[in-house]
Every structure is written in C-alpha cells, then in structure tokens.
Image (spheres, coloured by chain):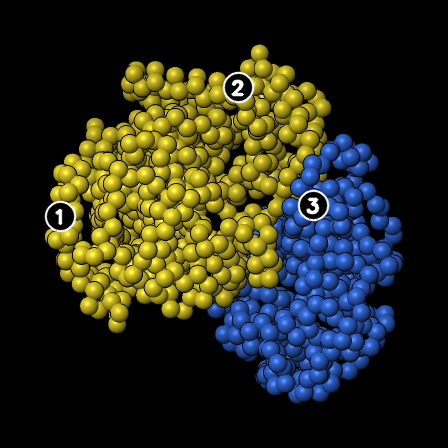
Amino acid sequence: MRPTRLQASRQNRRSAFFFRRGKLPLFLTLLFCSMTLQAQEHPFYISFYYAPPPAGLSNAAPVYQGLAVSTDLGESWMNRGWITSAVNAIAVDPANSAHVLLGSDYGVLESGNAGEDWKLISGWDMPAVLDIEMDATGIWAATTEGIFLSKDGGASWNTSNAGLSTPDGTYVTQLLRVPGSMLIATNDGVYRSADKGASWRRSGLESQPLSGLQAHPKDPTHLLAWSEQDGIWVSTDGGRSWTNRNEGLRFPSVKCAVFDPRDRSTLLIGTRITGVMRSSDLGKTWEFASGGLTNLNINALLFDPRQPDRVYAGAENGSFISDSRGKTWQPFSIRLGYVSDLWMQ
Amino acid sequence: MKAKALLFILFLSIAATQPVAAQLDISVRRDSIRTFFTTADIDANYPAATARVLDTVHREEGLAMLGALTSSVSPDVIERFQMTASYIHVRPQLSDSLRERIESIWEFFPIRPLQGEHERVAYYTALYLASTYFSPDAHFFNGKSREENVHDAQDFLLNWIRESTERGQREFDSPTYASMFFMSMLLLRDFARDEDLRLRAELMAQWLLADFAHDYLNGSYCGAHSREKRDPATLSLPVANGMSSIAWLYFGDGPRVYGRAQYFALLSDFQPHPAIVELATVRREPYESWERKRPAKQIRSGLVPVVDDVVRYTYMDPLYALGSIPGGKVQAREQHSWDVTWIPEDPTSAANLFVMHPWSDPASLLPFLPHSDEIAFRNIGLVDPYYDTVTKMVGGSPFEDVFQHRNTLIALYDLEEVKRFPLIIGYLPADPRDMRVDTLKSGWISINTGDVYIGMYPLKKFRIADSQGKPLFVSNELRNGVIVQVIGRNEAGSFKSFMQKLHKTVIDTSAFDSDMRIRYTTMDGEKLDFTYHGQRTVNGNTIGMAKDKLFDSPRLTSELGSGMLTIHAINGDVIIDMHALEIRQSQ
C-alpha cells in the first residue's frame, strides 16, 4: 500500500474559499471533508453518483457523486472521494479495509486511509473503469477498452487483452475472481484467464452484451451472468455451460444479481423496471420481491456478511435494506442518488 | 539543442518574409484587442483580469478581478484552464495570497470528467503548466506529484499531436472549440520547459491554423464540423465564434471580433506562417476540399460499434462555401452536418443556411458521456435541455444522408422510424435581399443574398414559418430531402438569370418514394445520382475521398500517417513537417 499525504492545514486553507451560488459540489466537499473519519471498525462503502443536493441548496449543479463511508453499520455517513467523478466500483484490500480502490470515469483512485486522501494511480490513457479488483496478481481494471492490469501497485499499467475478440474494443463490465482463474463479463460474452491475465479464452455466452457476473460465495461452480437486454443465465459447472433463466421475468433487463450465501438455489436480481425479483430454485421460477421499494431500478445488491438475513439494495434513486433475505424492503439511512456499488466488511 | 535552433530559424524566416503592411495592420489590431480587454466594461473574466494586471494603470483593478474570480471554484475544466493561463502570464504581479489561492484550487478541487477532446487538451495543458510553474511544495487534487503530472500531461499532449497530425482530429473544425486547441498550443509553445514539446506545440498551432484557413471565409469557419456550442446567436452568425476572433487577430479581413482565446493569443509572439495567411485571405479560384477526421471517442456503451473515419467535404468559392459530412457520423448532440456560408453585405447579419433533422435519443449520448443511460438522459434534461428541443440548431441524425459535388448538395432524410420530432427544419437567412418561394411551378426557393444566390428545392411539401422574425423552413414529410444549388453573382449574372437557369435544371424524383433515389442535372449540366445510404455518382462515376489522404485539395494536402501538411502557396509549397520538426519551403 502506498502512503498517502495528509496536511494538517488543509481544512483551514479550504475554508478560506467562499462559494457562490450554483457551485454546489465544492461546497459539499468542504462540508463532508471537515468531518474526521475514526478507526475503521466496520467499514461500509457505497459508491454512487447523481445524489440529490441537500435541501435548500441550488439544483444548478446536479452531478454530485463519490463514495459514502460509514463506520457504524450505516447509522451515519461521510462523503469521500472525488465528488466530480462518477464512481462505478469499489475494491477493498482484504488485509486492510482502509485501503480502498475506486473504479471511476477518471481511472483508478486509491486511498490508504478510507477515503480521506486519494491518489489517481492511472494515467491519461485509462478509459472509464467499470470494475476494479485487487489480488495477488495485481490491480485489475475492467474498462470500456478492455482489461488494464498493474503488477506494481498502480505505478504502471499494461493492457491485458490477448484472446479477446476485439482486443482494443472489448467493453468489460465486470471482473470475477474464482479459484485458479479470473472471469470477466464483456460485451461479447464471458471470458476466462487461467494465467493471470496473460491470455483469455471464451467461457460461453458468445456475442451476448453482458452487464455482470457473480459466483456463489461458497461454491464458485455456481455462476450467474446477466444482461440489460436479455436477462439472466445460470451455470452450475463453473461456466462451461449456461442456461437462460428468463421465464417468469416480466422484463428481462437485469442490472445486478446475487446468490444467497446460505443457499445455492436462492438468488436475487435487481432489474431496470421491476425492482427486485427472487428465485428459490436457481431461476426456474421467479417472484416479485419489491415490497417497500420506492424505486424499481436496482443497480446493486449486497448480502450483509454479519447478518445473513439482511440485504442491501442500491437503486437509481435511493438505497434500501431488507431483513427478510430480500423479500421485503424499507428505505436505508442514507439518501443517495444512483448507487453503483456496495461493499461491507 | 537541435530543436531550439530550428525554433529560432522558424521565427526568423517568418519575420523576414512578413509584409510590412501586414505587420502594421496586425499591430493596430493587437492594440485594439489589448485596449478592449483592459478597459471595456465587461463581466469579470480571466482574459480581462489578465489584461488589467499587465497594464500598470489598471493593475489593482485586475488583481481585484482575479481575486473575485478565484474566490469561487467551478469543476469546469475550461474555467480551470483560463485561470491557469492567467496565472502563467501574471505570476510576477501576483500577491502571495492570490498565488496560494490559485495553487490551492488545484490542490483541493477536482475537475469534472473530461468529455470532449478540447477539454482533454485544455486540461492536460493547464495541468502541465501548473505542475511546472507552481511553487515547489504545490500539491494537486489527483494526489500525483508535480513530476508525475508533468509526465502524464506531456505524454498525453504528444500523443494527441501525433494522432491529430497523422490520423486526424476527433473534434474537428469547430468554430468555437478549435480556439481551445489553438490557445493550448500557444501556451505550450511559450511556456513549456521541454524544448521538444515547445517546438511541436508551435508546429501544431501552425497546423491548426492552416486547417482553419483552408475552410475560412472572411471571418467565418465554414462547412460542416463535429461540435459547436449550443448558442443560437452564434450558430446563425458564423463570424461571432472563437475562431473568428483568432482570424481577426491574424488575418484581419473579416469583421472585428473580440474573444477570450484571442486575448491569450495576443500575449504570444506567435505569428502564422505567411502561407497560412495567404491560404485564408487570397482566393482566386474555387476549390474542392476533402478532409479525413476521426470519429468521436466513445467513453461508454460497447453496444455502439466504432464507426468509420469521418469525411468532410467543402467547396470553397471566393464568395461562399458549401460544406458537408458525406461519410461517417460524428455526434448526435452537436454535429453540424452541412451548410452554406457566404460573405454578407452587413457583417453582423446571419450568413448561413442549413437544414437539419432535430434528432434526440438518450442512447445516442452514451458513447460521449461518462454516465449510464439513465443518468445521461437525466443529466441532459437538466443541464442541456437544448439537446432535446425541436428547434435546436446543432446535432447530427442517423436518419440523414448527404451527397455533395462542388456547389450542389442533396440532403435526404428518412424519418419513418423516428418517433420524436419526425420533421426537418431549415434555417433560412433572416434578411436576404430577395427570396422567392415558387411552390406553384418550379418548386424552388430562390434566395438572393447580394453577391451569392442560393436555390433550395424541397422534395416534399413544406411551409415557411416565422420564428421571431426569421423565416424557418419546416416539412413534416417522413421521406424527405432538399437539393441545394449555390452560385456567385459573378458567375450567374442577375438574380433573374439565376432563377431561369435554376428552373431549367432536371430533377428526377421518380424513384424517390420507392428507393429514396434522386437524379439531378445541375446548372452546370453535371448528372448527380444519389440513393439514401447508397450509391453516389457524378456523371456515372463514383466519387469519394481517397483512402490514403488526410487533406486533399489544391491548396492543402497531407498523406494519411505522414505527419506532413503541405500548403500549396503562390510562391511554392510550404511543408509543416512533424517528423523533421520544421516548416520548410519545398525545393
């Protein structure tokens, strides 16, 4: 982990500025960053963009985005990260939850202190980053122009697209680490690399423009892949074969999906229009599970690792919590706009 | 040291060949611009603040203006760029507190993600200069060190220069945004510490200006372009754009225009090569111009295929220009697909004509905006409602196709699948000397602008509406199109004679309803055959741009990938050579 810079005088210097009306995001920076984050006991991160501005302030600068951080299981929140950059994905160091990477439209941002300071660790040639992972191989960035991989903590980056159908033009939406290999969801199906990104081979769903990929946390042979156009597919053999599970979906536009960690057959999907849908037979049948949702455009779902009945949902406009394994919902404590990713220790 | 020597020789040769009269003229124009920005009663802006600080009489006023401007911060990169340009020019006059404030803005406040090419060039130019000239303990919002930022910025800028000169620009020929590229290159030419970058920036500034001069007519940047500011006032008045102010500074033949980029250009001792001034101002014969450009960079949406190179075609006459994009689609949001521009009798009156399909579709924004479709749609609705209005004056459409040969243009529109705004709108000159709409016999709309006559033949039923005193061509037919003929009075004679010739042209629309095919015999007797998204022939020969050319005209040529631009001047060829890093006269 790279040390990050802290300046004792920063808050005072920042306060010297007076912000005129219509320059909302910078005012918010001052507001949030004047709070000090304490030790990371139970970090909970939500990346988002397009939150509504606080009441009473101008709507002239509508794009307000970044990373929301809570250390008290969501009771209180602080805004961290660059609020002018759409943050698409979060990656957290398993050994140090204060070491955070963000995949953003600026590239890859890194913080060593849970978001108090950030450094852009990618160069000018990094396209928008849609997903980010870190593992023993290095830092993986899924971008609109393929995979970028850094093996030196972000000091240098190389493309890692050998074997992809259009090496410079493949749109990669998600990275999924499974034992022995890395899977990626692309605009041309699923690919797998078993040699740390040196080469990629197809792993099904060729020519499908996929939006994401997920594995069961305890059984990585159980996989989900989904698309915003053509619904969801299930694999029970590690990606060798896929079965479409759209029957019963009223509108096959899937934006996120998760397995219930306690059950290999139960899964939740977040959809574009129909909110959350739930299946207890691996997608053969579906039931609506949107009771309590006030927004039916769901981007992210996360089972609480501490409380297995609890699930969080990030929506296009708001965030929600369920204490019934995703059957019913209620609004969550933080008011955010478009939630793009959730991470919890 | 070789680069430094070449730079020196370049300036020396320009000074030696510059006509004395032109030098006097430009000195008068320089004084006028300087006086305007120093004394005019205008809203606070960075060029005005800079001008006042650099003037001993108005220095306190300028410093106060700079203080006011920097007391608030915007995430807009153009504002950051102008602030940094001011800093670079007036840094010896700044108080410690003002210098620290500007440096603090860079330290604490990020910039919104960069969407357009001009924003990227402006950002990396400003980042390079700030990282070079800020105090040694300066920090930056991106967490990178000064050295890292200089490295990133220089790498980007050199790559952009190389790609633009070898493969073409993405944001091309924009009457407003081109001034940002030019201004950036001048700042680097004057203030980059790296000699190689300084020299390349000098040559790139000359290259950009030659590209501009090639399509320039008495103050106006003519023809089609990738992007333009969504300002109806400047869209209908081509001489009121940023590049027009640059033209007035260097070429001096158009109407007097002041612009922010122009003021920063004034502070540089850069001078365009005389061959470029000649290219812009000496027009003896009409010429056809082909230019190859690159499609806009896609930020998102892998579902949108990468489109082919964009081809731009312009017919430059000493009195008018007719230009279009016959190949490749650039931007639904801000593209200007075709127009006629002429030299008006009154320089402040509108002097262009174009027809467009006001297409808007959230999905069309995805390649260019760093947001998901939901966010892009909402964002556009909030910050850019103009994009989704029926009367917008910029924007390409996938439902239009254009074919042009010299002074004749055929634009076809197939709107049968269009749900929102299935109509075409034409922006006609507000106050022509004469305009005849002959719906009963010939079907032509004939326009007399003074020195230039324009004929427009709508293929389907239309009406002329009144839009705040300006005539607006409107047609709701779903399969539609117009034929446009332009000619100077010097060639056509009287307006009556022009109309007689126009009415004798042969228009064959027999295959239009079935195949969207038009056959048209021009006033010059040339036979054009055009099918929507299909064949395009002149006298039976297929025409198009040569695949190995970047620029192709009698006045300007460049081979694709060569990095060399040849200006065919009266006294011989002048070559801007990005590999040899020199401008040289051809042997």
Which chain does the numbered disc 3 sit on? A
Question: Horizontal placement of A64 versus A229: left or right?
Answer: right
Residue identified by numbered label 1: B500
In primary-sequence order, the first of circles 2 and 1 is 2
Q: Which SS class for mark 1?
A: helix
In the rendered image, which residue does mark 3 sit on?
A58
| Residue B520 point in image, percent of width and height | 18, 58
Residue type (three-letter) at the residue carrying disc 3: Ser
The foreground one among A318 and A76 is: A318
In three-dimensional space, the C-alpha distance between marks 3 and 1, rounded to whole angstroms, equals 60 Å
Q: Residue at x 28, y 61 (%)?
A: B460
Q: CA distance from mark 2 to mark 1?
A: 54 Å
Reply above or below: B6 against B222: above
Q: Which chain is blue?
A: A
- Callout 2 amino acid: Thr
Under mark 1, the amino acid is Gln
Residue linked to disc 2: B38
Do the dots labelled 3 and 1 sit on one chain?
no
Q: Position of residue B546 (x, y in %)?
A: 26, 53
